[in-house]
Structures are given as structure tokens and as C-alpha cells.
């Protein structure tokens, strides 16, 4: 009986150890980068995962490019993983998988959810620093935020509209997502900037769901319900493009002012032809590059300011063309 108990104890222990080993192994395997564009996991200094809002968004591809270049320079093994389309459930699942894989650092867009905050705390307990990028989560245990001061960006947009227009303005705002913290800040910054200008009135705020077709539909809705609209402000990268399409269809380029966000090629093309008057420029390449460097500093034990704001400015047609080198600090943005 004693021998049987001893055998049962040893067998149970071996199964437990084997299960733990397989969990760790396949957790690591889940995050193997398939593109072969960064140092291998066996020769790199660190293993970092970048989790965007959505994988194939042009804006996030610029973030990825910056992170990729920093990873190559610092001999870091970088992976780019996340939802194909914006989806908070898939986003937090990817973070949980990265933690299970025991990576050295996580770069991710901040989410205003309890589950996100719980996972960031879990990562911290496992000594995995989390750097939020593009959108902060200041109430979480994230180590550092790298990205635009989104309130200030919205404020700049409001000031630009004040300076660029004369007479009464009826403004329609199109925002990526009503519940996205960074989009809320861009709207609030704009509101606060124009609050002292009685001639500027915000008449509608619609959501585009961060899609071009969503922006087109939102702009059509505003024009239909508020034919007195004279100006538009788009708070995410595709909003200005969708607004411009509607304005061109209406042949109202000379009557409607548009200020957009970011410098996607279509946005710049609409600026060149005069449909979009201005756009707020972020530096996504800079965000990606600096986020990787902050993870490395944190792993080395450096104490960092938790807010690492990247550059923001408003540009006009006369500022074009904008070279990739100018936007990327000498490299593709």
C-alpha cells in the first residue's frame, strides 16, 4: 500500500511537471514570428510582442515599421500580433497569450476595460513590462505610455479651424469609436479649443467604426440631417477620407472646410487638390521605434517618465509634399 501511494505520488508529480513544460513551450511557440524579418529568438536580446488595434490598418503598419527597425537595430525578437479588425475581446486574448508565452515585454494599445487592467497587472507580477502606445490606460499598471497627447491633438485641430475659418461655422465631427479613450480625448480637446469662439457650433458627432465606408455613411447622415453644416473634423485616419468623398460627390469643396487626422496617401491627395484643408499629423513610426527602446530601458532597470509623448502638428497643402524621411526621423515613417 505504501509503495502504491509512493508510485501514485511520483506519477502525479511527473504529469504535473510535463503539463507545465508543455504549457510554457507551446505558449512560446504561439508567438514565433513567421516573417523572418527580425533576429531569431535564440540569438536576440529580448522577445517583444506588439499588439495593435487591428493588424492591417495602414496607421498601425507604420507603427510596426518603426518597431521593426528599432528591433533590428537593438537585436530584439519582435512579433506583430492582434485582431484583424478592431475587437477588444480578441485584443485582450492576445495580451493573455503573450503573458502565457513569458515574453520580455508587451507593446499594446491601451483599452479602457477592467479585463485589460487585470492582464496588465498580471504581466507586471510576472516582470513583463507593458508599454501602451497610441492610446494610454493611465489607471492600469502599465509602465510607460508612448504616443500622441490626444487631448492636445484635438485642441490643435480646434485652433486650426478657428484660425482657418471666418464667420459662423456649423461643425460635424466624425470619430472612429465613441468608446475609444483616445478618440474621446481628440473630441474633447477640439471642443475645449472652440468653446470660447461663439461663432463655431458643434451640431453633430457621428461614429465611423474606424472604417472608410463608416466615415462616408456618417458624413452622409450629417449632411442629410444638418444641411447647414459648413465644416467637418475627422478624429481617426480614415474619417477625413470618407468625409472628402462625400464633399466631392456633393461638389461642395469650396463650401465645406475639412480638417482630418494622419497622413495616409489618400488624405494627402485630397489635400493636394484642396478638398481637405488641413490634417493633424502624428508620428506612428516614432511611436513604434521609441516603444521598443522603452521596453529595453525598462528591462535594464531604468526609471522612466510614464508619459512619453511623441510629436504632433497640423499641416496644410503648402507643407506638401511630406517626405517619408521627414516624418520618420530619416527613415520611413
Image: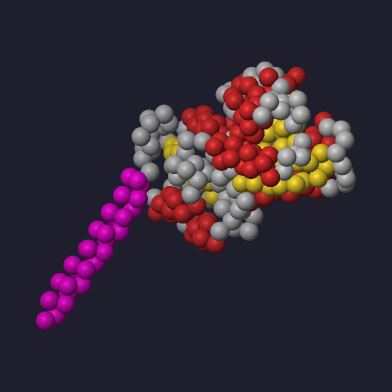
Dominant SS of magenta comes to helix
Foreground residue among 16 and 274: 274
Please tell me whether residue 267 is drawn above or below residue 198 in the rendered image.
above
Please tell me whether residue 227 is drawn above or below residue 266 in the rendered image.
below
The answer to whether residue 124 is left or right of residue 37 is right
Res 63 → quadrant: top right
Find residue 187 and report its horizontal and vertical position in percent. Answer: 71, 46
Foreground residue among 116 and 317: 317
Query: How many circles with numbers are drawn on the protein?
Result: 0
Foreground residue among 25 and 88: 88
Residue at image point 87% right, 42% down:
199
The answer to whether residue 170 is left or right of residue 311 is right
Find residue 314 and report its horizontal and vertical position in percent. Answer: 74, 31
Picture colour scheme = secondary structure
Residue at image point 43% right, 31% down:
38
Residue at image point 64% right, 39% down:
219
Please tell me whether residue 56 is drawn above or below residue 10 in the rendered image.
above
Q: In the rendered structure, does residue 166 fall within the stretch colored magenta?
A: no
Find residue 87 and report its horizontal and vertical position in percent. Answer: 48, 49
Specify the segment rendered in magenta.
Answer: 1-30
Image quarter in which the C terminus is found: top right
Please tell me whether residue 76 is drawn above or below residue 129 in the rendered image.
above
Residue 179 is at least partly visible in this image:
yes
Find residue 295 and report its horizontal and vertical position in percent. Answer: 55, 43
Foreground residue among 45 and 134: 134
Residue at image point 26% right, 64% down:
16
Q: In the rendered structure, does residue 5 fall within the stretch colored magenta?
A: yes
Amino acid at each position: 500500500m505504501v509503495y502504491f501511494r509512493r508510485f501514485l505520488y511520483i506519477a502525479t508529480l511527473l504529469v504535473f511537471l510535463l503539463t507545465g513544460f508543455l504549457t510554457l513551450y507551446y505558449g512560446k511557440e504561439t508567438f514565433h514570428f513567421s516573417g523572418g524579418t527580425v533576429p531569431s529568438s535564440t540569438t536576440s536580446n529580448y522577445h517583444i510582442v506588439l499588439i495593435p488595434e487591428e493588424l492591417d490598418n495602414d496607421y498601425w503598419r507604420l507603427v510596426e515599421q518603426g518597431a521593426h527597425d528599432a528591433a533590428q537595430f537593438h537585436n530584439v525578437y519582435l512579433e506583430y500580433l492582434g485582431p484583424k479588425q478592431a475587437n477588444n475581446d480578441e485584443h485582450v486574448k492576445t495580451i493573455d497569450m503573450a503573458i502565457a508565452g513569458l515574453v520580455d515585454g508587451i507593446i499594446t494599445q491601451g483599452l479602457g476595460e477592467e479585463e485589460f487592467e487585470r492582464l496588465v497587472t498580471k504581466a507586471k507580477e510576472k516582470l513583463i513590462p507593458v508599454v501602451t502606445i497610441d492610446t494610454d490606460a493611465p489607471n492600469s499598471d502599465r509602465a510607460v505610455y508612448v504616443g500622441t497627447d490626444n487631448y492636445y491633438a484635438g485642441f490643435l485641430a480646434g485652433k486650426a479651424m478657428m484660425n482657418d475659418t471666418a464667420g459662423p461655422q456649423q461643425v460635424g465631427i466624425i470619430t472612429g469609436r465613441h468608446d475609444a479613450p483616445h478618440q474621446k480625448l481628440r473630441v474633447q480637446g477640439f471642443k475645449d479649443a472652440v468653446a470660447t469662439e461663439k461663432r463655431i457650433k458643434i451640431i453633430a458627432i457621428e461614429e465611423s467604426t474606424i472604417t472608410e465606408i463608416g466615415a462616408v455613411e456618417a458624413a452622409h447622415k450629417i449632411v442629410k440631417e444638418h444641411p447647414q453644416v459648413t465644416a467637418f473634423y475627422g478624429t481617426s485616419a480614415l474619417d477625413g477620407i470618407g468625409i472628402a468623398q462625400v464633399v466631392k460627390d456633393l461638389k461642395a469643396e469650396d463650401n465645406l472646410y475639412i480638417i482630418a487626422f494622419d497622413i495616409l496617401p489618400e488624405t494627402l491627395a485630397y489635400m493636394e487638390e484642396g478638398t481637405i484643408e488641413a490634417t493633424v499629423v502624428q508620428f506612428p513610426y516614432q511611436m513604434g521605434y521609441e516603444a521598443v527602446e522603452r521596453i529595453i530601458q525598462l528591462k535594464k532597470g531604468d526609471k522612466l517618465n510614464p508619459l512619453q509623448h511623441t510629436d504632433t502638428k497640423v499641416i496644410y497643402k503648402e507643407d506638401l509634399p511630406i517626405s517619408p524621411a521627414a516624418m520618420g526621423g530619416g527613415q520611413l515613417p
